[in-house]
Amino acid sequence: MHSQSSAVGGDSHIRPARPEDLGPLEDLEHEAFSGDKMSRRSLRRFLTRSTSMFLVGVREGRVVGAILAIERRGVRDARIYSVAVFSPHRGEGWGRRLVREAEAVAFARGARRMRLEIRRDNEASRGLFRGLGYHIVSPLPAYYEGGIDGDRWERELTVENGREENR
């Protein structure tokens, strides 16, 4: 994993999530999402699955954000399942750095495309992923809890974009 000190300041880095991160990950899930939350059991399962790319952003020893991407065996796609940053750390570049690191890990594992779903009313995520080069590939009517529409987004992964902004 790459040090993030210059981008977000202080003793900051991104690393694979560990079982001892379960408490902060559960707290993050509850703070960041009003619906469609992962249960403690699901978080624990993703921490140990070989197809999971579960990364955390850490600042001064504390988890400040996380991304979960899933490798799809037999397919050259990976899927971002969740990305979230604790509210005091939003706007510090953590979301962008977590996505870029997950892309690099996915590319190293053989993925050549990253996909995700975003709620239509989540302007912050839509802006983040648009700025990272993702584009909408299909609408997802009533995809989310409460009948909220979404869209499927994707980006091709290459060795070049797997390295950019990670150092």
Image (tube, rainbow, N blue to C red):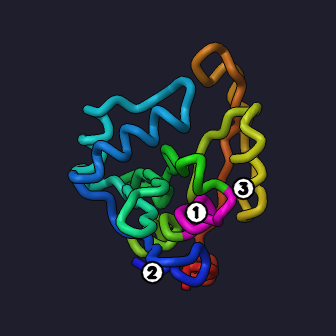
- Up the image or down, 118 lies above or below 59; here it is above
Assign the C terminus to one quadrant of the image.
bottom right
Extent of the magenta region: 91-100
Q: Residue at coordinates 44% horizontally, 73% vertically from top-left? A: 13
- Label 3, label 1: how many angstroms apart (C-alpha)? 11 Å
Q: Are marks 3 and 1 in contact (CB under 8 Å)?
A: no
> First in sequence: mark 2 or mark 3?
2
Instruction: Give the residue at mark 1.
Output: 94
Q: Position of residue 87 (x, y in %)?
A: 59, 47
Instruction: Indicate whether residue 73 is drawn in magenta.
Output: no
Against 131, residue 165 (above or below) is: below
Give whichever of discs 3 and 1 has the lower sequence position: 1
In this rendering, the answer to whether 155 lies above or below 165 is above
For the residue marked with disc 1, what is the amino acid?
Trp
Instruction: Judge from the rendering whether residue 74 lies leftward or rightward of residue 154; answer left or right.
Output: left
Say what amino acid the circle numbered 2 marks: His
Evaluate if marks 2 and 3 touch, with contact meaning CB atoms under 8 Å apart.
no
Mark 3 secondary-structure assignment: helix
Give the alpha-carbon distance from disc 2 to disc 3, as whole Å: 20 Å
Of residues 145 and 95, the one drawn nearer to the viewer in this rendering: 95
The amino acid type of the residue labelled 3 equals Leu
Decide: few, some or many residues near mark 2? Use Cα within 10 Å; few <14, some 14-19, many ≥20. Answer: few
- Tell me how many marks there are: 3
